């Protein structure tokens, strides 16, 4: 499949790969919405029945015990609440989260699910419950992962070329004019290729993580440590899943999940920046290794000459 997608890797199609992967995510989101909204979890009815039974049992205990025997009321009420707690825990383990299928599988949430599948983040906060959904997820991941790898490589090259051009222009503007004139009056040497330092890449990534930290901290009421933790684990594709934007139940019922769409854009662009930094830092490492190899060769040559003179 990767070989079939290689024609999209041409210089004219590098940006088109980004549009292709966004379209792939949108098609997948509509598909999973259609499949998963046909299935309503039976845990919703079980929890509702469990809640009603708990309220009825508490009322019976209150009618019988509380007027005459406080300790007996406390004991029986605690027993009723423990039964409710056990039933609710079992329902949560089977997938209950208090939302219907329509509330869970909104378009922004399905879009985030598709992103977590083909980028291999795998938050785990949303799961397909139907047999069709699980089967389609396997096929969707098998087709989407090579497409994402192609996006990662091509978008990294595009952003690296853009950032390298910008850094070169800024570097040329900052060079002293007198030093340029002295070079021009001297030997006619070819211009030295400018390498983007690793520190510049780290500053770019740090600023991007800082932007996400402030944004998600304000939206989700997370502290800054938790927000930074989410940004770093997501951009590194660790995807622990303990922090996910837009997971509030009331927001899903109100239909206010715009932050999931923004999170989708933030992660997709951020992974492109990670690929850019990988390309630029790899280039610097190659240059440093080449210089180290030349230094080592010169050092060994000097040692050889000294040894010859001594002998």
Image (cartoon, rainbow, N blue to C red):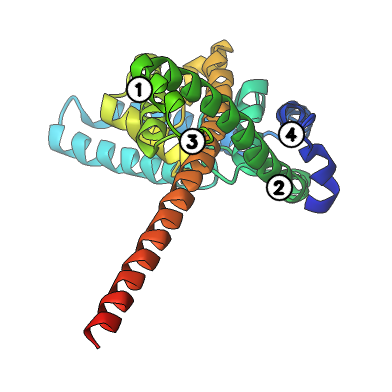
Closer to viewer: mark 3 or mark 2: 3
Q: Position of residue 141 (x, y in %)?
A: 71, 47
**Quadrant where the C terminus is found in the figure:** bottom left
**Crowding near the residue tagged with mark 2, few <14, some 14–19, many ≥20 C-alpha atoms within 10 Å:** some
Q: Which residue is mark 4?
A: 32
Closer to viewer: mark 1 or mark 3: 1
Secondary structure beneath dot 1 equals helix
Q: Which residue is mark 2?
A: 141
Q: Position of residue 268 (x, y in %)?
A: 58, 30
Check the image and report above or below for 51 versus 309. Answer: above
Q: Looking at the image, which residue is at 54% across and 43% down?
A: 121
Q: Which residue is mark 1?
A: 179
Q: Position of residue 305 (x, y in %)?
A: 31, 76
Q: Which residue is mark 3?
A: 192
Say left or right for 66 vs 209: left
* Residue 202 figure quarter: top left
């Amino acid at each position: 499949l990767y070989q079939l997608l290689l024609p999209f890797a041409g210089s004219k199609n590098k940006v088109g790969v980004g549009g292709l992967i966004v379209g792939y995510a949108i098609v997948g989101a509509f598909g999973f919405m259609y499949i998963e909204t046909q299935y309503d979890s039976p845990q919703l009815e079980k929890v509702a029945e469990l809640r009603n039974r708990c309220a009825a049992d508490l009322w019976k205990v209150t009618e019988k015990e509380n007027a005459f025997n406080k300790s007996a009321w406390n004991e029986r009420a605690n027993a009723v609440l423990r039964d409710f707690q056990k039933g609710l825990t079992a329902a949560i383990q089977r997938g209950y989260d208090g939302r219907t299928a329509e509330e869970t599988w909104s378009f922004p949430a399905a879009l985030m699910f598709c992103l977590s599948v083909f980028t291999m983040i795998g938050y785990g906060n949303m799961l397909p419950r139907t047999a069709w959904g699980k089967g389609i997820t396997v096929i969707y991941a098998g087709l989407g992962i090579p497409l994402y790898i192609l996006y990662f490589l091509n978008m990294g090259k595009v952003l690296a070329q853009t950032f390298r051009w910008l850094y070169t222009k800024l570097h040329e503007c900052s060079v002293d004019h007198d030093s340029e004139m002295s070079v021009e009056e001297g030997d006619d040497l070819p211009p030295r290729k400018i390498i983007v330092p690793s520190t510049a890449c780290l500053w770019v990534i740090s600023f991007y993580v800082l932007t996400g930290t402030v944004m998600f901290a304000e939206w989700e009421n997370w502290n800054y440590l938790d927000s930074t933790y989410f940004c770093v684990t997501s951009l590194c594709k660790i995807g622990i899943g303990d922090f996910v934007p837009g997971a509030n139940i009331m927001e899903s019922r109100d239909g206010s999940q715009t932050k999931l769409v923004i999170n989708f854009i933030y992660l997709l662009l951020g992974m492109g920046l990670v690929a850019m930094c990988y390309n630029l830092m790899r280039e610097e490492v190659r240059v440093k290794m080449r210089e180290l190899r030349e230094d080592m060769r010169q050092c060994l040559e000097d040692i050889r000459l000294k040894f010859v003179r001594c002998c």
